[in-house]
C-alpha cells in the first residue's frame, strides 16, 4: 500500500511486530505502556518508518501479533497516525514463547 494510506488497512488482517510490550517503560519519556505497541512490517508511514500499531484486548506482553485493523488514531500534532489492532480474534506469540489463540 502507498504512503499515507493507513486508513486503507482498516478491516484488513495484518501482522504486527511488537517493540514495546505491555507493561514496558518508554526509554526516553518513562511512561508505562498499557498496551502492546509496535509496527506493521513492510509498510511506510509519512514519517518514513513503518506504520505504528496498538494491539488492544491482549492482557499479556507479546512479541508479535496477527489481527484485524479496527481503527486509525489520527494525531493532530504530527503525521504519524497509529493503527488500532483488535485482540479479539488474533493469534499472538508471547515473550515467553507460548502460542495463544484468542477466539
Image: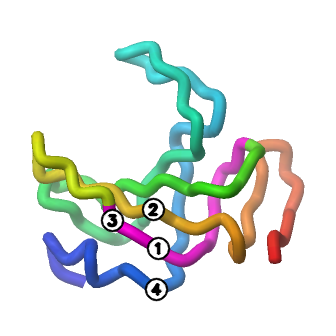
Is disc 2 in contact with disc 1, using a CB cutoff of under 8 Å? Answer: yes
Which secondary structure, mark 3?
A: strand
Q: Which residue is mark 2?
A: 84
**Residue 81 vs residue 2, the one in the foreground:** 81
Q: Answer above or below: position of 47 versus 5.
A: above
User: Which mark is first along the chain, 4 or 1?
Assistant: 4
Residue that carries the numbered disc 3 in the rendered image:
72
Where residue 51 appears, as percent x and y from the top left, is: 32, 61
Q: Quadrant of the N terminus?
A: bottom left
Q: Is residue 36 above or below residue 82?
A: above
Check contact, mark 2 vs mark 4: CB within 8 A. Answer: no
Q: Which residue occupies 12% across, 52% down?
A: 79
Tell me where the magenta segment starts and ends, as one range: 61-72
97 or 60, nearer to the observer: 60
Q: Which residue is mark 4?
A: 12
- Which residue is under mark 1? 70
Amino acid at each position: 500500500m502507498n504512503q499515507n494510506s493507513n486508513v486503507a488497512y482498516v478491516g484488513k488482517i495484518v501482522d504486527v511486530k511488537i517493540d514495546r510490550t505491555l507493561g514496558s517503560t518508554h526509554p526516553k519519556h518513562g511512561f508505562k505502556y498499557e498496551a502492546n505497541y509496535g509496527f506493521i512490517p513492510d509498510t511506510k508511514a509519512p514519517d518514513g518508518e513503518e506504520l505504528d500499531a496498538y494491539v488492544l484486548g491482549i492482557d499479556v506482553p507479546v512479541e508479535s501479533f496477527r489481527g484485524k485493523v479496527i481503527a486509525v488514531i489520527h494525531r493532530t500534532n504530527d503525521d504519524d497516525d497509529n493503527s488500532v489492532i483488535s485482540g479479539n480474534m488474533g493469534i499472538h506469540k508471547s515473550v515467553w514463547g507460548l502460542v495463544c489463540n484468542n477466539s
